[in-house]
Structures are given as C-alpha cells and as structure tokens.
Amino acid sequence: MTARQIVAISAGLGQPSSTRLLADRLSAATVAELGDLGVTAEVTTVELRDVAHAVTDAMLTGFASGDLAEVIEKVTGADALVLVTPLFTTTYSGLFKSFVDILDKDSLQGMPVLLGATGGTSRHSLAVEYSMRPLFTYLHADVATTSVFAATDDWAAEGDSTHDAGPLPARIRKAAKELAGTVAAREPRTTTGMFDGVPSFAQMFGQ
C-alpha cells in the first residue's frame, strides 16, 4: 500500500518555536487518524526559515533552485498539507506569504489543507479565518473546516499529565480527523518530478 505523503510547513522564525511544535502536533495527529482508518502516511516537515533567503531570491528572479525547488516539489506533490504560521499584526508572516506567492497559482487546486497559527494571545485567533482561509480558498485548496490557533497560554499545561484533555489537544484531534477523512477518501496522488519529461542534451541534439 502506498503511504500518503503529508507535508507540514512551519513558518516559525525561532528555533525552537511554538509554530513548529503546533505543526508537529497537527501532522502527528493526522497520521494517527489515518492509521485508525487503515491508511499509512509519512510526514515531511519543512521549516521555511531554512530556505528564507532562497524564497526572497525566487521572488526577485521568478526561479526557485536547490533546496527550495525540492521543497516546492514536495509541497505540490503531497497528498495533504499542514500549514502553520505565526501571526504578526493579526495576519500571517511575510515569510509564509512570500512562500505561497512563489508557488504556481494552480498547484494547490484541490489539495487537502489544514491551517494552523500561533500567537501571543487568543484575541488573534480569528485571524486564521479572516486572513489564512481566504488565501487558500482563493487558491482553490480543499481547506479543512476546523483550523487550530495556539496562544502562549495554550502551551502552559504541557507539563500537566492531564493536558491531552484540554481544549487545544481536542481541537488538534478534531482538525486532524477532518483532514484524515478527506485524504483517506481519495486515491494517492501520482506526480512526476520537476524535470521528468524534460529531454536530455543528448536527446535534444539527436545523439
């Protein structure tokens, strides 16, 4: 059985970051929910901070190369995406938006997507709905109904053995279940690499 490919994108700027932590929790929960449905899955996690300079270069040149090109290929060829960004001034980070901007506008069409965000206070929780969701709706992605916002206070119970029963873990499980259900209902994606089908120099010169 072909394992479904889940790509988790973290736009956190620090290391470690609560954004990466939320991305890990969401992707792990999705894999667990898929397992309950009899579907195997693998997760690839990408931290955008590692390709931040390449993202800027791609914005300027219109061409992605090296590690960034590999990241884009993984993202556009995935069975589902978990996308998590910190919020700045009540919206997604500039790095997150810049990465989305360098993707082909049709590359996420129909892609199952789970949205998450982190911020200092729960007052910004609705930013996921009025900034992130419209962006991916515009790109025609299949966005899970439940999104997950984690404020600083939501991580306060991490040392408590009962924290799995809290509101954040419950919301993570709910969102992951929705994403898993969408992925399980579809056939695995079959994609070709960025350069598949491109003729070699020998082919072009008839050698």
Image: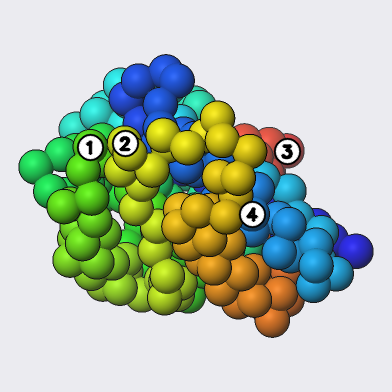
Q: Position of residue 194 (x, y in %)?
A: 56, 47
Q: Quadrant of the C terminus?
A: top right
Q: Which residue is mark 1?
A: 120
Q: Earlier in the sequence, mark 3 or mark 1?
A: 1
Q: Which residue is mark 2?
A: 152
Looking at the picture, which amino acid does disc 2 mark?
Thr
Residue 207: assigned label: 3
Q: Earlier in the sequence, mark 3 or mark 4?
A: 4
Tell me the quarter of the picture where residue 13 sits.
top left
Looking at the picture, which amino acid does disc 1 mark?
Gly
Q: Earlier in the sequence, mark 2 or mark 1?
A: 1
Residue 29: assigned label: 4
Q: Is residue 48 above or below residue 189?
A: above
Q: Position of residue 154 (x, y in %)?
A: 38, 43
Label 4 element class = helix
Front residue of 98 and 123: 123
Mark 3 or 4: in front is: 4
Q: Residues within 10 Å of mark 2 (few under 14, many from 20)?
A: few
Q: Position of residue 7 (x, y in %)?
A: 57, 48
